Image (cartoon, helix red, strand yellow):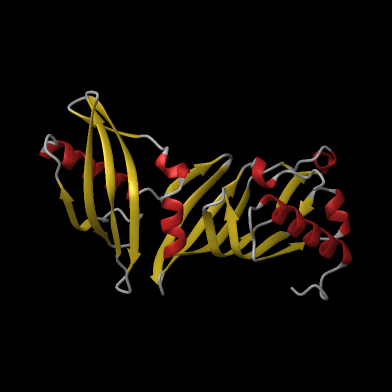
């Protein structure tokens, strides 16, 4: 729907939503919000639907989305909550999104401080083994394959081991039959074959994850494709409440 076709309340809400979202992002090339409702429904806390289209969205400095298209179902919220600077949903909101991320942006995000500080854990012979992913570099192939190179820092019995690896994976990453087409590693002295096998199984479990929880938003990956060095995700979202990063309505 063009701005000329929108009613004044819809246009006003859409423009304000664009301004608020832009202020919450570290960087944005373009963003367009289309709120579909009428003046009576606004005062009742109802929106028929909201669509969003954006390019070059950056959050947390190093996490960049090349392109996003999002469409929600109807939204029911507490109109009084807006007065106090936030939007409180009365019922969960369903949404579908298409997200496009470039190979370069994926590599930048995977080597961010956020990823480097994530401690993961696997179990070997009933004992915990902690590990961290380091120096990750992926390549998106035209044959719908993902090549991943990197290092894994493991801590077992207070001893640290470093493992360099190369893995080739075939999307869809969330399918139950996902397997490594190839996994090669440069084994450091002192790392057992059992530990490497357990590590491969743990990484496979992480790759097969299709559902994620962020604040009060559930994200389900429905499809993954590769085209022109870009990863294209189709994601279904169930929003119970709007997270703080996009819920601030204070003036900026």
Above or below, 27 against 141 in this view is above
Q: Quadrant of the N terminus?
A: bottom right
Q: Position of residue 100 (x, y in %)?
A: 50, 65
Q: Position of residue 2 (x, y in %)?
A: 76, 75
Left or right for 146, reference 47: left
The residue under the point 55% across, 61% down is 97
Q: Position of residue 214 (x, y in %)?
A: 53, 42
Above or below, 19 against 200 in this view is below
Above or below, 7 against 26 in this view is below
Left or right for 216, reference 8: left
The residue under the point 43% across, 44% down is 115
Left or right for 251, reference 187: right
The quadrant in which residue 205 appears is: top left
Q: Is residue 55 visible?
A: yes
The residue under the point 28% across, 39% down is 153
Q: Is residue 172 visible?
A: no
């Amino acid at each position: 729907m063009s701005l000329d076709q929108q009613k004044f309340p819809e246009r006003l809400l859409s423009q304000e939503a664009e301004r608020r979202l832009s202020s919450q992002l570290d960087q944005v090339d373009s963003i367009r919000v289309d709120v579909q409702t009428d003046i009576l429904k606004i005062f009742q806390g109802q929106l028929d639907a909201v669509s969003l289209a954006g390019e070059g969205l950056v959050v947390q400095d190093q996490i960049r989305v090349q392109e996003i298209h999002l469409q929600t179902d109807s939204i029911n919220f507490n109109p009084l909550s807006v007065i106090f600077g936030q939007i409180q949903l009365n019922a969960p909101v369903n949404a579908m999104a298409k997200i496009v991320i470039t190979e370069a942006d994926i590599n930048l995000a995977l080597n961010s401080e956020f990823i480097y500080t994530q401690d993961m854990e696997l179990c070997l012979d009933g004992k915990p083994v902690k590990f961290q992913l380091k120096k990750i570099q992926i390549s998106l192939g035209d044959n719908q394959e993902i090549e991943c190179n990197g290092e894994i820092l493991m801590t077992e019995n207070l001893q640290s081991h470093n493992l360099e690896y190369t893995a080739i994976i075939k999307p869809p990453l969330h399918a139950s039959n996902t397997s490594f087409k190839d996994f090669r590693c440069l084994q450091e002295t002192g790392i057992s074959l059992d530990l490497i096998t357990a590590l491969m199984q743990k990484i496979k479990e992480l790759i097969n994850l299709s559902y994620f929880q962020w604040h009060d938003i559930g994200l389900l990956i429905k499809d993954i494709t590769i085209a022109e060095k870009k990863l294209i995700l189709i994601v279904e979202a169930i929003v119970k409440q709007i997270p703080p990063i996009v819920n601030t309505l204070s003036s900026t």
